[in-house]
Image (tube, grey):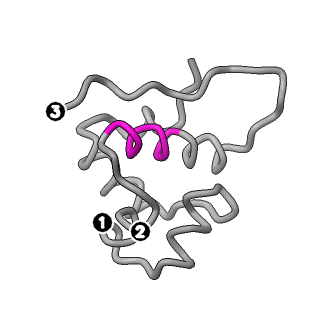
């Protein structure tokens, strides 16, 4: 299994929680060489819906956060963290 995914870095730009989660999901997927389509497969979403979540335009639902938490083997709050 790859090393621990790198979380979004804190900056002066305001980032919404859904954008923060999306960025952390993208970082975790990048370490596994996975893409937005793989997110759709994991969560049972259509490609357009997965892409909307991937880019942070639409927030993840609680059940999706739980599934991502299990996938990354990290607590749910990890998805919201900024380093």
Residue 28 vs residue 64, the one in the foreground: 28
Q: Residues within 10 Å of mark 2 (few under 14, many from 20)?
A: some
In this rendering, would 74 be left or right of 35?
left
Residue 54 versus residue 50 in the image, above or below: above
Q: CA distance from mark 2 to mark 3?
A: 21 Å
Q: CA distance from mark 2 to mark 1?
A: 9 Å
Q: Residues within 10 Å of mark 3 (few under 14, many from 20)?
A: few
Q: Dot 3 corresponds to which residue?
A: 1
Q: Secondary structure at mark 1?
A: helix
Q: Dot 2 corresponds to which residue?
A: 37
Residue positioned 30% across, 57% down in the render: 67
Residue 42 place in picture, x, y as percent: 30, 66
Q: Secondary structure at mark 2?
A: helix
Among numbered discs 1 and 3, the one appearing first in the sequence: 3
In this rendering, would 70 be left or right of 37?
left
Residue positioned 42% across, 77% down in the render: 45
Residue 11 place in picture, x, y as percent: 76, 21
Among numbered discs 2 and 3, the one appearing first in the sequence: 3
Q: Which residues are magenta?
A: 24-31
Q: Is residue 30 magenta?
A: yes
Residue positioned 75% across, 38% down in the render: 15
């Amino acid at each position: 299994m790859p090393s621990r995914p790198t979380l979004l870095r804190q900056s002066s730009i305001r980032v919404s929680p859904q954008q923060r989660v999306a960025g952390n999901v993208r970082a975790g997927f990048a370490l596994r060489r996975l893409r937005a389509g793989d997110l759709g497969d994991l969560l049972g979403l259509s490609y357009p819906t997965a892409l909307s979540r991937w880019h942070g335009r639409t927030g993840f639902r609680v059940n999706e956060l739980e599934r991502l938490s299990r996938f990354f083997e990290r607590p749910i709050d990890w998805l919201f963290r900024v380093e």
